[in-house]
Image (cartoon, rainbow, N blue to C red):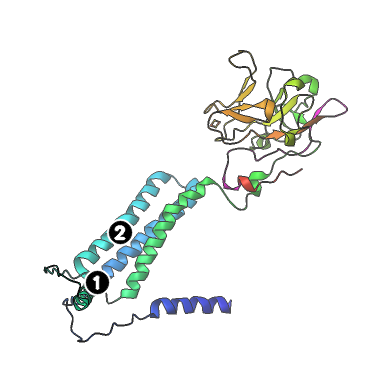
Amino acid sequence: MTRVRNAIVSGLVLLLGRRRRRRPREEDTRIVPALPPNPAAELAVLALLGLSSLAALGFILIYAFANSLPAVTPLLGATIGLAFLFLAAALVVVGLRLVPVEEVAEEYPPHEHPGEQQVIAEVLDESGTRFTRARLFKLGLFGAGGTLGLALLAPAVSFGPLFHVGDFLRTPWRRGRRLVDENGRPYKASDIAEKDFYLAFPEGTSDEEKEQMAASLVVIRLPPAQLDLPPHLKGYDANGILAYSRICTHAGCAISLYRAPLFQPDEPRPALVCPCHYSTFNPANGGTVTFGPAGRNLPLLPVYIDSGGYLRATGNFDGPVGPSWWGVRLWKAQP
Ligand code: FES
């Protein structure tokens, strides 16, 4: 703790105590006349920068607690708008009250002359802000710029978590868990007919748990000869019975259409279709996307038929369930 405190104190001393080295000059006379100190304008600028920081901070807090606040969108618009407004007002006050205006008309010199360049550099230097609380002003400016930058970056959090993603990856599916229908009745393999489509849930889940993203499945049966599963999904089917996640990998709608191959040759392949934006998945080859905006395969749950003829899970899905987010690539299949 002591080392951290010392580091913070040293940093502040360096930031606030750093003195600008004065450039050696032949005469100690100013080229641009100095403005008289204007403490009221300086205070106004600091106050406006502080208000800009507070408004940007308000935006971040409203964004963070958006679920528990009413009228979030107008609040977000108002806070980010005020942050920019206060920042602009601070800069206007600086320009009107604190920066001396100097107009110099001069013939362009025929040749470079080091002495004249030095004078021009002096004029530029002295035309800068005459701010008696210069370091405080810099801190205010960095503070307002920093909080505004954070406020603009805050919405990126909505792309999804990068760390602590355990809750998103947890599924109720374990080896040996039976597949049941909406009323809790276990499915037998003989219940699953070709060209039909069944909803399934893990046995023993409550109605509330059935609503969880990774709980529900769509179960279909294809002739084993039609299966073309990639090598890492070999054995995921049970005699042609396939159990896919019901949640579309585009934006999380429920897959609720099954197009059996009824329109040959126009629609020769079976397809699971999401009704929201028509992402279409080929169940024969591991749920690959054949149409629409989904960016990844529909996750497949490995299943087997037990000695009583019931369908059971062999393990977990082959990929993360639901829409993609930053942490999806960190996912590792759990047996
Ligand atoms: S949510 Fe399924 S296609 Fe968009």
Determine crowd level at label 2: few under 14, some 14-19, many 20+ residues with C-alpha closer than 10 A: many
Percent coordinates x, y for residue 80 in the rendering: 37, 52
Could you tell me if residue 65 is visible in this image?
no
Q: Secondary structure at mark 1?
A: loop
Percent coordinates x, y for residue 79 in the rendering: 37, 52
Instruction: Give the side of residue 317 with respect to residue 266, left or right.
Output: right
Residue drawn at (35%, 66%), measured in percent from left and top?
A: 141
Let me know if residue 313 is in the magenta part. yes
The quadrant the N terminus occupies is bottom right
State the extent of the magenta-drawn residues as a range: 306-327
Residue that mark 1 sits on: 128
Q: Main secondary structure of the magenta part?
A: loop
Let me know if residue 17 is in the magenta part. no
Q: Quadrant of residue 333?
A: top right
Tell me, for residue 181, which label it has, or none.
none
Tell me, for residue 86, which label it has, or none.
2
Give the distance between the C-alpha atoms of the residues marked 2 and 1, in whole angstroms.
Answer: 22 Å
Tell whether label 1 touches label 2 (CB within 8 Å): no
Percent coordinates x, y for residue 280 in the rendering: 58, 26
Q: Amino acid at mark 1?
A: Gly
The quadrant the C terminus occupies is top right
Q: Amino acid at mark 2?
A: Phe
